[in-house]
Image (spheres, rainbow, N blue to C red):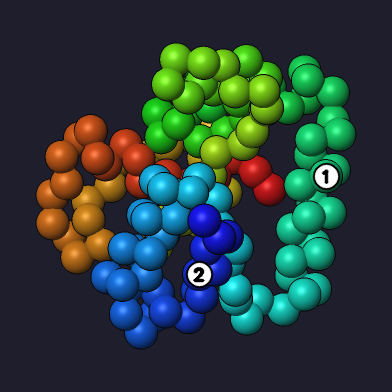
Amino acid sequence: MSLPILNLSLHRTNPALFADQLRKACHEIGFFLLQHDIPSTVCNRALDETHQFFSRPLEEKMTISYEQSPAFRGYMPLGVENTEGRVDGRDQIEYAAEYHGMLRQRKQHPHQHPIMNGEHGEQMPLFYNRLRATNPWP
């Protein structure tokens, strides 16, 4: 087996193929290398911010605990996450894409996770709607 190399630009040109490659890499190998055209300054800032966050005391990280988010976004301390019933040896922060209008609502109501309609006005089931939220950090 070799390390899968995925090119993020394929997501724009052929999303189905990219999804198939990503699924295969995750299910068969467990990790992959992602080629992208994101400027190194952005990547370096993301690494710096991440290092700063995880260097904080536990009490400070827990202020954005995933337990406070209906969308399961936020900090998860060591021993919370598991794979196939076995505890993973890491702490982590869960985040995802934010949706239109969410940033404005986040600034007005930083601790609320509003329920929204779909991007085109369609009604979304409640269980899915709650995943449409803002990220607690940064």
Q: Position of residue 119 (x, y in %)?
A: 25, 62
Q: Residue at x 85, y 43 (%)?
A: 52
| Amino acid type, residue under disc 2 in the picture | Leu
Q: Residue at x 36, y 54 (%)?
A: 23
Q: Is 42 left or right of 123, judged from the image as shown? A: right
Q: Quick one: 91 or 118, which is closer to the camera?
A: 91
Q: Establish if 45 lies above or below 106.
A: below
Residue 38: quadrant of the picture: bottom right
Question: In the rendered image, which residue does mark 2 sit on?
Answer: 6
Q: Establish if 51 lies above or below 81.
A: below
Question: In the rendered image, which residue does mark 1 sit on?
Answer: 51
Q: Nearer the viewer, mark 1 or mark 2?
A: 2
| Amino acid type, residue under disc 1 in the picture | His
Mark sitting earlier along the chain (1/2): 2
Determine contact: label 1, label 2, CB under 8 Å. Answer: no
Q: Residue at x 80, y 62 (%)?
A: 45
Q: Is 127 left or right of 130, judged from the image as shown? A: left
Q: Quick one: 19 or 57, which is closer to the camera?
A: 19
